[in-house]
Amino acid sequence: MAGLLSDSEKQALRERVKELTCLYGISQIAGCPGTSPDQVLQSVAELLPSAWQYPEMASARITVDNLVYQTPVFWEAGQKQSAVIMAGDRARGIVEIAYAEQMPDIDEGPFLKEERNLIDEVSRQIALIIERRQAQEDRVSLCAQVRHADRLATIGILAAGIAHELNEPLTNILGFAQLAKKCSGLPEPAVKDIEQIETASLHAREIIQKLLIFARQKPPMKAKVNLNQIVQDSLYLLEARCANEGIELRQVLHPDLPEITADGSQLGQVVVNLIVNALQSMCADGHVLVQTHFSEGSVHLIVEDNGSGMSEEVLEKIFVPFFTTKDIGQGTGLGLPVVHGIVVAHGGSIDVESEPGSGSRFHIQLPIHRET
């Protein structure tokens, strides 16, 4: 009779309904607000068996970036159907369906050709979930970087204003102290007091110079320089201190490093500040590794140590002037902000990786070709 379906057509329809229900379920799971990516993938894995021909015998497993999400039991030795998860032109994992018992052969082993289409579509849907998650993480990271850059820019403006305001009275203090010291007949205690005023003024002037470098108010004097030579000169200044403190100072410098246009004195300050920062985080038997290499358009400076490392909270503040985790009198909190100011003024970038107890790694990139 017209309009009635055969048994095979009814079976095909039931399978199609299960496939569509599965894909709809995946879209619902992926769109549920407040659900973590791990929860999404676990829920998808638990949903998949119901879409296959023998759901009571089926198990599912999703592997993404070496993380596994699966049904309570996965039949490792059973008959399997799988599809690779391709996200961003890169294989990120695999979707697998396995049966607990030997099932009769149909189209692809015990699996229907429609099930091949379904598992391929499931892998594409998971790839979309991964890409959306990556895009969200990138967006959050970018927003954090923008906020951090805004904060540094604001602090830089304030620092430059404060430095300029303090510079003139400080110069007067230093000048009058030096004039007073030349007066004859001063008692010894007065001479010592004037010398302390002079020393304190010089120290304050040094801090102001660092603030101006951080705020990029002091333009670099650029010329063609070789970063390897700058590193070697800087390490020479610190070798004795490292030896006295029992710290091993190692260098791996690329022999054919191209020259860059930069202020050699300021880059030397970058190297010294990074190594001193590393030394202050270590005890005896530690080591500092300084490396250089280059890629197309950039030279790279890496300073890595096995010191105490930094937490995420500290990492967020290391380029803020006067922020320090050191004891009072152990530092001004300007070493790393000055590094940041110099690198940015040279058109470069700086990335930092660190974990408590695992040391820190500073990676600086500087352009090879840049207008002076």
Image (cartoon, rainbow, N blue to C red):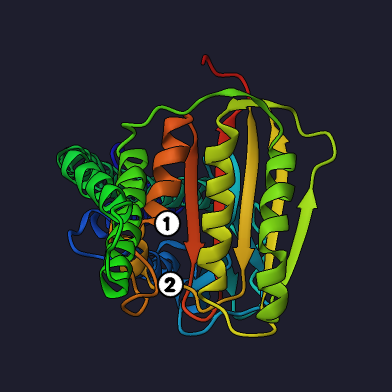
Q: Position of residue 288 (x, y in %)?
A: 67, 67
Q: Would you name the residue on which mark 2 appears?
A: 310
Residue 218 visible in the picture:
yes
Which residue is more in the foreground, 252 or 52? 252
Rendered image: mark on residue 29: none
Residue 320 is left or right of residue 283, and the answer is left
Which residue is more in the foreground, 292 or 163? 163
Q: Secondary structure at mark 2?
A: loop
Q: Quadrant of the N terminus?
A: top left
The residue carrying pointer 1 sits among few (fewer than 14), some (14 to 19) or many (20 or more) residues within 10 Å by Cα, namely many
Q: Position of residue 155 (x, y in %)?
A: 20, 46
Which residue is more in the foreground, 252 or 240? 240
User: Between tags 1 and 2, which lies in front?
Assistant: 1
Name the N-terminal-most of marks 1 and 2: 2
Q: Residue furthest right?
A: 255
Q: Secondary structure at mark 1?
A: helix
Q: Residue at x 23, y 56 (%)?
A: 28
Residue 95 visible in the picture:
no
Residue 156 is left or right of residue 352, and the answer is left
Q: Position of residue 193 (x, y in %)?
A: 27, 69
Q: Would you name the residue on which mark 1 appears?
A: 335
| Picture layout, residue 46 above or below residue 266 | below
Q: Residue at x 71, y 69 (%)?
A: 240
Task: Name the residue type under label 2.
Answer: Met
| Picture layout, residue 358 above or below residue 129 | below
